[in-house]
Amino acid sequence: MRLVALICVLAAMAVTCAIARAHAADRSRTVPCSESIDGTRFPYVGSNDPGRRYRFVLGAVSAPPAYLEQTSPTGERRWRYFSKAGLVIRAGREGPVLVSVPHGWRDRAAIAWGYGGHGVFSSLRIAGCG
């Protein structure tokens, strides 16, 4: 009887952990125009160093390079490393820009954005601002 109870408890814990993990991996956030930090010429290229240049994506976004050198440990178990980079969205876009982590990577990478305290997300919707 104790073995059956233990198996039930372990099964319930596994299901709870799987559900919690799925919810954390699928969080989304809409960034309002009020969180825009500054304006710059578009497309933004950043550094003159080719390895550090921003990439022009779909005519709407200047995205950081694929590899970011400044990665720092967080001291947290779930998300062990952190890199900070800006994202430049072309002004006057009619619709939002969606940035997301592919489903297969959501247990390894996430997006944290904003003035802190918002948490970690698998997708970020940036409102179209004038």
Image (tube, rainbow, N blue to C red):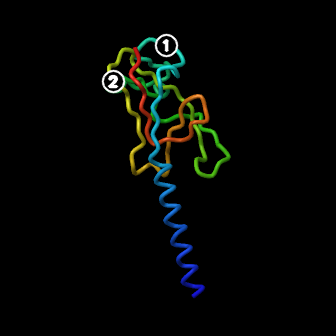
Q: How many marks?
A: 2
Quarter of the image holding residue 93?
A: top left
**Quadrant including the N terminus:** bottom right
Mark 1 lies on a secondary structure that is loop
Give whichever of 93, 8 is nearer the camera: 8
* Residue visible at 51% across and 55% down in the picture: 20
Mark 2 lies on a secondary structure that is loop
Amino acid on which disc 2 is placed: Gly
Amino acid on which disc 1 is placed: Gly
Decide: is 58 above or below 92: below
Decide: is 67 above or below 75: above
* Residue visible at 43% across and 39% down in the picture: 123
Contact between marks 2 and 1 (CB within 8 A): the answer is: no
Q: Which residue is mark 1?
A: 39
**Quadrant including the C terminus:** top left
Decide: is 7 above or below 130: below
